[in-house]
Image (tube, helix red, strand yellow):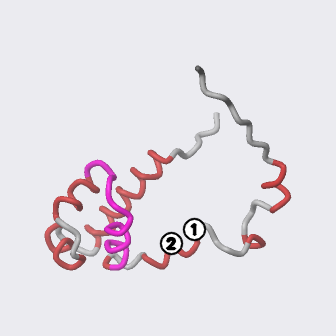
Amino acid sequence: MLALNTPKKQLLALRDRFKERRLTLRYTQNSLAQMTGVSLGSIKRFESSGEISLKSFLKLSVTLECLDDFDSIAPLDIEDNEISLQTLQNISVKHRRGSR
C-alpha cells in the first residue's frame, strides 16, 4: 500500500522538525519568541497543533537558520522539475456541478 503525504501529515511533520530544531539550538519557546517577534502563544499553538501564520513561520525559519530551505518549493524553472509541461497538459480536470 502506498502511503501518500497529505497536507495534515506535512503540517505535523514541519511542526515536529521545527520543534526539534529549536531544542537542538537550545532555545526555549520564550527565547524564540523574543528573538523572532512571534508571540509566545503563536509558538505554543504551532508546536501543539501545527497552526501558524505564514509570516510567523518564515520569521521562525530565519532564526532557526532554515529559511533558504524554502527555495526548493515551487521552483520557477520547469526544466528542474520532475513533472514536465507535457505531463501537466495531459492532466484532465473534471468539473462537477453542485446539487440543486
Label 2 SS: helix
- Magenta span: predominant SS is helix
- Between 78 and 10, the one nearer to me in the picture: 78
How crowded pointer 2 is (Cα within 10 Å; few <14, some 14-19, many 20+) is rated as few
Q: Is residue 93 left or right of residue 70?
A: right
- Between 98 and 68, the one nearer to me in the picture: 98
Q: Which mark is residue 73?
A: 1
Q: Is residue 79 left or right of residue 43?
A: right
How many numbered dots are placed on residues in this image? 2
Q: Residue 86: x and y, percent?
A: 85, 58
- Between 96 and 65, the one nearer to me in the picture: 96
- Circle 2 residue: 70
Residue beneath the point at 38% across and 64% down:
54
Identified by mark 1, the residue type is Ile
User: In whole angstroms, how far apart are the C-alphas of marks 1 and 2?
Assistant: 5 Å
- Between 12 and 90, the one nearer to me in the picture: 90
Residue beneath the point at 30% across and 62% down:
19
Residue 54: in magenta span:
yes
Residue 60: in magenta span:
yes
Q: Residue furthest left?
A: 30
Mark 1 touches mark 2? (CB < 8 Å): yes
How crowded pointer 1 is (Cα within 10 Å; few <14, some 14-19, many 20+) is rated as few
Label 1 SS: loop
Q: Residue 51: x and y, percent?
A: 32, 53
Image position of 99 with respect to 56: above or below? above
- The image quadrant where one finds the C terminus is top right
Question: Which portion, as a residue range, is magenta?
Answer: 48-62
